[in-house]
Image (cartoon, grey):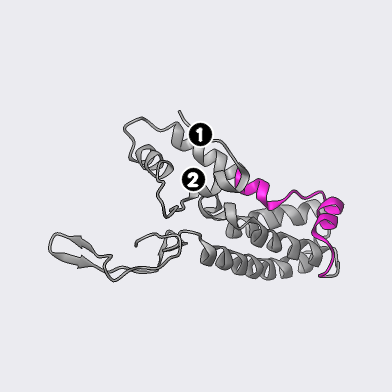
Amino acid sequence: MIFRKDGRISSTDILVWGNEVIETVKTYTYLGVVFSSNSLFTQQAKLAKEKGKKAINNIWSVLVKGRIHEPDSRMKIFNAMVDSTTLYAAAIWGSCHTALLEEVQQYFLKKSYKLPKTAPQYFVRLETGCNHVKLKVFANLIKFWIRILNKPENSIVKASYYSIRGIKSKHEIYNWSWQARIQENLPVLTR
């Protein structure tokens, strides 16, 4: 897979291993995450939203049949079953898609409290005491950074991080490290 900001792959972009030409693709699913050639993870975000809404529909019958009306209990079930599905590996891909991910939580809360679909998000968050999904994504991103930075100096994971962190070109190739910094104007994390 060749990563470019616009996602276009030129016919001259050829990868070779030995004497064999390697197939170039625009998307590739690895460990359940859809990587795209533009490295923006838009397809992954849409897929996560879809999976999250399906998970809500799956747990809804449990909530209704179990007569679980207590808001804290509902949120625990939501966090365990839906958030874990929706936010899977979001530390890598989710920093630019938090608004889309927020829709899953809002869908659940509006359904739980029987609010109209047009109820403003800020109102729902204030009344329910729920934080932005963005906070979960960035908390996980920071934990992920810390795990990388705590790796030994000769670790391939740490070397890869330093490599992608340093990528800059006239084409502005994007990666998760730069997306997070651009999104929230975060500083570069070093040793």
Three-letter code for the amino acid on which mark 1 is drawn? Leu
Which structural element holds mark 2?
A: helix
- Of residues 3 and 107, which is closer to you in this image? 3
Residue at horizontal 67%, vertical 59%?
99
Q: Quadrant of residue 141?
A: top right
> Residue most toward the front?
170
Q: Residue at x 28, y 65 (%)?
A: 13
Q: Is residue 104 rendered magenta in the image?
A: no
Tell me which amino acid carries mark 2: Ser
Query: Which quadrant holds the N terminus?
Result: bottom left
Q: Residue at x 45, y 37 (%)?
A: 148
* Residue behind mark 2: 177
Residue displayed at 77% across by 53% down? 73
The image's mark for residue 189 is: 1
Sequence order check: which comes first, mark 1 or mark 2?
A: 2
In the rendered image, which quarter is residue 151 located in?
top left
Determine the CA span between mark 1 and mark 2.
9 Å
Spot occupied by residue 21 in the image (x, y as percentages of width and height): 20, 67
Provide the residue span drawn in magenta: 117-138
In x, y percent, where is residue 97? 60, 58
